[in-house]
Image: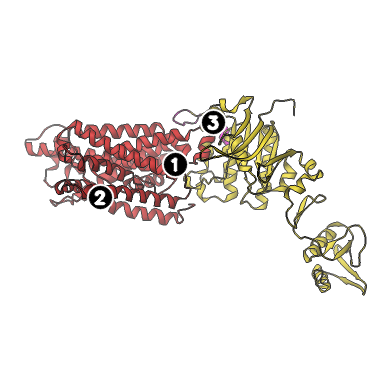
Chain colours: A red, B yellow
Amino acid sequence: MEITRNLRLTGLLLLLAFLFLADIALGSVRIPLRQIFNIVFSIGSENTTWQYIVEKIRIPKTCTAVLAGCGLSVSGLQMQTLFRNPLADPSLLGITAGANLGVAIIMLAGGSITTLYTIKELGISGSWSVIVSACMGAAAIMLLVLTVAGRLKDNVMMLIIGFMIATITLSLISILQYFSAPELIKDYLIWTFGSLGGVNGSQLYILALAVVAGLLLSFLSSKLLDAALLGENYARSMGLSPQRVRAVIVCSTSLLAGSITAFCGPIGFIGIAVPHMARSLFNTSNHRILIPACCLIGAVLMLLCDLIAQLPGSQTVLPINIITALVGAPAVIWIILRRNNLRGY
Amino acid sequence: MNNKPPLLQTMNLVTGYLSGSKRRIPVAGPLDLQIFAGQLICLLGSNGSGKSTLLRTLAGLQPPLEGIMTIAGIPSHQISSSRLARKISLVLTDSVRSSNLTVYSLVALGRYPYSNWLGILRESDQLIIKMAIEATGIEDFLDRKVATLSDGEVQKVMLARALAQDTPLMMLDEPTAHLDLPSRIQLMRLLHQLARQTDKGILVSTHELDLALQVADEVWLLQPQTGIGALLKRGTPEDLVLDGIFGTAFEKEGIRFDKTTGSFQVHPGNGMLITILGGGAAAFWTKRAVQRLGFSVDEERPTALIIRVWEENGKARWALEQKCGTQSHETMKSLLEALSLVSPIA
C-alpha cells in the first residue's frame, strides 16, 4: 500500500511538472519550445517579446492556476469534513457567492474607486481591498451556513439551504447590478466568467501569500480535521473543541476561497471533485496525506482546465469557469451515482 | 468494591435543557449516583425517559442544570476537555458511516487525546490499538470502509475505538439497538468481561431488559414523572425485580412482568382458565402455546380444562381432559386445533 501510494505520488508530481511547462509553452502566440526552456530557466532569449510574454503573462498565469487549484481543492476538502457531506464545496454552499458579493460591493458600489480595472491599477492597496472584502464576504456566508448547519442533520437539506443562501447572495448582487452604471456591470460580468490571466506582479505575491497562509493553517490543523470526521459529539469526547475546529476551518476556507475568487472570479466544481479523487487515489481519510494530495491533484486539474481553455492552436481563450464546470459537473454526477443514497451513505 | 473512591460521583444532579431565554426544562433529577471501577451498570428506562440526556450529561457533552459532578474526585467544570478525554470514552448513536474511514483508522482515532499535534502514533499507541482490536475481535475487517459494515460490526468497531482511548470510564448509548439477538448477547457479554478484566467502570443505556438483568452489576432505572423530571431507582437487578420496582416501571396496559421467569408476557391472559400438569421443556412450551390462544394458565388448582404432558420414547405427548371426556394428541398442532374448538375468548 505504501509503495503504490509513493508511486502515485511520483506520477502526480511528474504530471504536475509536465503540465506546468506545457501551460507555459502553449498559448495564442507560438513560441519555440527551446526558447521557452531558455526563458523559464533564465538563460534568456533574443526575442524580447517572447521573453515578455513568458515572464509577464504565462508564468504568472500558470502560477495562479496552481495556487487556485491547491486552494479551492483544500477548501473543498475542509468543508466536506466539517459538514460531513460529500457534496459540500465553497461554490455549492454559497461561500464563493459570498466572496462574489464582497467583490461586487467594492466594484459596483465602490463610488470613487470604480472598476476592478482601476482597483488593480491602484496596485497593492487596491488588491488588498478586493481580497479583504472577498474574504469577509466568504466568511460571513460561511458563518451563516454554519449556524444553519447546526440545526440540520440531513445532508440533502444542508445542500438545499446552502443553495438558497447562495441564491439570496446572488440576488443581492443582482440588486447592486440593477442600480449600477452599464460600464461597471460589464467589467463585473467579465470578472464573473473567471480568469487566471488577470493576476500579475505584486498581485501574484498577495494571492500566493493568502493561499499559502490558508494551506498552512489547514495542514497544521489536520489532526483536528481527522477527529471532526466522526462528528461533533465524538470529536468533543476526544477532547476537541468544536468551536476551535469551526474557527480554523472558517478562517482558512474564507482565506482560500475569498482570495482566489477575488482575483480569478468564481471558479466552481474544483473544490467538490478533487477531494474525492484524492480519497480514492490515496485510499485514506487521513488529512495529513489528503491535504497535500488535494494540492497536487487540484493543481494538475486546474492546469489541465487552463490548457483546454486556451483551445490549443487557436487565438480564443474560453473563460476558465466554463471548463471547470464541464469537467467538474460530471464528476459530481459520478459521486452521486457511486454513493447511491446520499442521506445515509 | 465500595472502599475504593468512585470514578464518577454526582450530588443532586439535575439533567435537562435550557430552552431559549433561560427557561429550564428538567429531564431527570435530583440524582445521587456513583460509578465504581469494575462495575457494569445498565441504564434502563422507557423511550423518552431521559436515558440519553443523563448519559450525555455524565459524559460532559451537555452541562447539568444543577448539582455537582466529580470525575476521579475533581469537579467536572474544573476538568479540561483534553483531560476529560482521558477519563471517559463514549460509544454514541451518531452515525459514523459518512466518514469514509477505514476500520483501522477509525479505531486509531481513539488515540487522539494522546497523540502529538500532527496526530502521529507512537509504538505504544499502536500496541493499545492492537489490544483493542483483539479484545473486540474485529481483526478480519480492518481494511474495510466503515460504510460497508453491518450494524453489529460498526458497534464492535466503535467499541474498539473507545477501548483504544484507554479510559477508566466508558459510556455506551444504546449500543445494542439495530443488532440481531446473537450480536446483542455477544456485545453485552463482551462489556461484562471488559468490566471484570480491565477494571473499567462501564455505563450502558439499553432497552434489553432481560440481558441487562443477566449482566449488570447494578441497574439504574429511570421513571418519568408527570410534570417534574424523571426519578431514578438504582440497585442490584435482582433486588429491583424482587421488590417489584422493575415490574411497575414497565407495566403498561396488558403487559405484565413475570417475576418467576424474568420476562414480559405478550398475551394478556384473561381468558378461560386451564391447568397444565407435567414438567420439563414440553410443559413450558405448552404453556406458551395455550397463552397465545388466549387461555389463562392456573398454576395452583385444577380447573375444568386440564392438559397432561408427558414424554414417551423421547417425544412429547398430550392428553386434553374435559367434562365430556379425554383426547390424546401426538403433536402440539392437533392439541391446539382441539383447544381452539373450545374457543376460550368467546
Return the residue nearer the eye: B149 or B20.
B20
Name the amino acid, label 1: Ser
Q: Which residue is mark 2?
A: A174
- Residue A106 percent location from the top left of the image: 22, 39
Crowdedness near tag 1: few (<14), some (14–19) or many (≥20) residues, C-alpha within 10 Å: many
Write down the region rendered in magenta: B116-130
Left or right: where B80 falls relative to A186: right
Left or right: where A154 falls relative to B296: left
Which element type, helix, strand or loop, lies under badge 3?
helix
**Are dots 3 and 2 in contact, CB under 8 Å?**
no
Task: Output the chain of dot 1.
Answer: A
Residue located 20% across and 31% down the image:
A125
Taking the magenta stretch, the answer to whether it contains residue B176 is no
Distance from the alpha carbon under mark 3 to that under mark 2: 56 Å
Residue located 73% across and 42% down the image:
B215
Left or right: where A87 falls relative to B317: left
Return the residue nearer the eye: B86 or B137.
B86
Q: Which one is closest to the eye, mark 1 or mark 2?
A: 2
Name the amino acid, label 2: Ser
**Are dots 3 and 1 in contact, CB under 8 Å?**
no
Q: Which residue is mark 3?
A: B125
Which element type, helix, strand or loop, lies under badge 2?
helix
Q: Is residue A16 visible?
A: no
* Residue A285: numbered disc: 1
